[in-house]
Image (cartoon, rainbow, N blue to C red):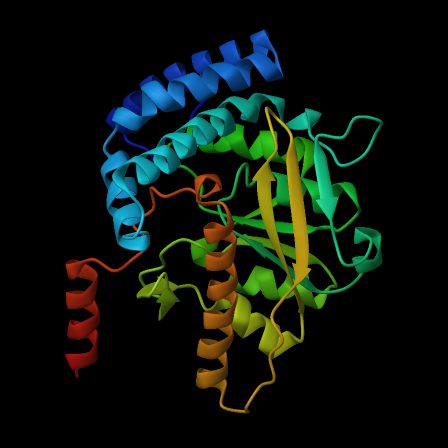
Amino acid sequence: MTEPGLTFLQKLRYGVEAAGFFVLMAVFRVIGLEAAGRLGGFLGRNVFCLLPPDRTARRNLLASFPEKTDEERDAIRIAMWDNLGRVVAEYPHLEKFSPLGDDPRIIFTTPEHPENYQGQPILFLSGHFANWEMMPILGEQFGLKGATIVRPPNNPYIANWIARQRAINGPGSLLAKHNAARRMMGQLRGGGVIYMLVDQKLREGIAVPFFGRDAMTTPAPAALALKLGARILMASNRRTGGARFHVTVTPGPDFTPSGDETRDIHDLTALLTTRIEEYVRADPAQWLWIHNRWPTARDIALTRDKKLAP
């Protein structure tokens, strides 16, 4: 397997990384879904939590929940790592997840049956809750054809494998988020669905409140909804035990445009972010706290320099 554009040293480094990853995925595959989840949870609680992103999780939890005790925040953090380990372990088994059949692993609650959304331009928005792959799987299983906006792993060998896994049971079309605008518009204009996680920092985004602090957030969903009249649906996801999930779908926030495009995009983005915060507060352990969600001093300096530039 080769990847164009890579130097020999990059191929070597990515190849070594991928070899270890694929061995782990093979183990998860061989031992079965439930055992893989238990092993993944163990690795999350005892190994992943020792990695540098744990410092980010601790910092984020302290800033977001200063009223909680250290023990309460640690319980959230360890549960988060347990969940993340399970998410990793579930990738070789994505074909086993479905809202259909006699024993569905995805239970869902929606204001109307998902099949009623077919043929409509829809922005299906969520965040990194429980296993976030369940949202596009749910939509795809009910015929809501479209594309998932993703940030592929830096390692191209791992990225290709994950893309194939996602396509087994979910949308086959994956759009890299940093160059997806035109294709997103094409999907929506054709009556398709865009599945998108909107809870990560976007340095080029706009600042809206999230847990009482400005967070740089993508304005793309608000801009597309206002421009194209696409319907917004939002989903929270909760792991109910083992490899089983409950996805709750709700309509997007009520919003009446003022006619000022810049203001409307900002205000709708703020409402969407408030909804994500409500989901997080409802069950903090279900969310992924390891993102650098809020601006750093470097981000603030870069923003200031852009404003001062002629």
Q: Is residue 92 left or right of residue 74?
A: right
Q: Is residue 116 left or right of residue 43?
A: right
123 lies above or below 85: below
Q: Nearer the viewer, residue 155 or 46?
A: 46
- Looking at the image, which is closer to me, 47 or 21? 47
Find residue 256 and report its horizontal and vertical position in percent: 61, 84
In this rendering, is residue 292 above or below 166?
below
Closer to us: 4 or 83: 83
- Residue 263 placement: quadrant: bottom left
Specify whether 139 is left or right of 160: right
- Residue 152 x %, y %: 44, 41
x then y, percent, for residue 75: 36, 33
Vertically, is 230 above or below 148? below
Instruction: Please tell me which residue is depicted at 60% across the width and 27% down the height of the picture.
Output: 241
Q: Tell me if residue 172 can be seen.
A: no
Q: Residue furthest bottom?
A: 259
- The residue sitting at 51% across, 43% down in the picture is 129
Where the C terminus falls, by quadrant?
bottom left
Residue 278 visible in image: yes
Image coordinates of residue 308 in percent, x first then y, are 15, 80
Residue drawn at the location 48% of the way across and 70% of the way down: 269
Image point 68% across, 62% down: which residue? Answer: 122
Q: How many labels sit on residues?
A: 0
Q: Is residue 68 left or right of residue 247?
A: left
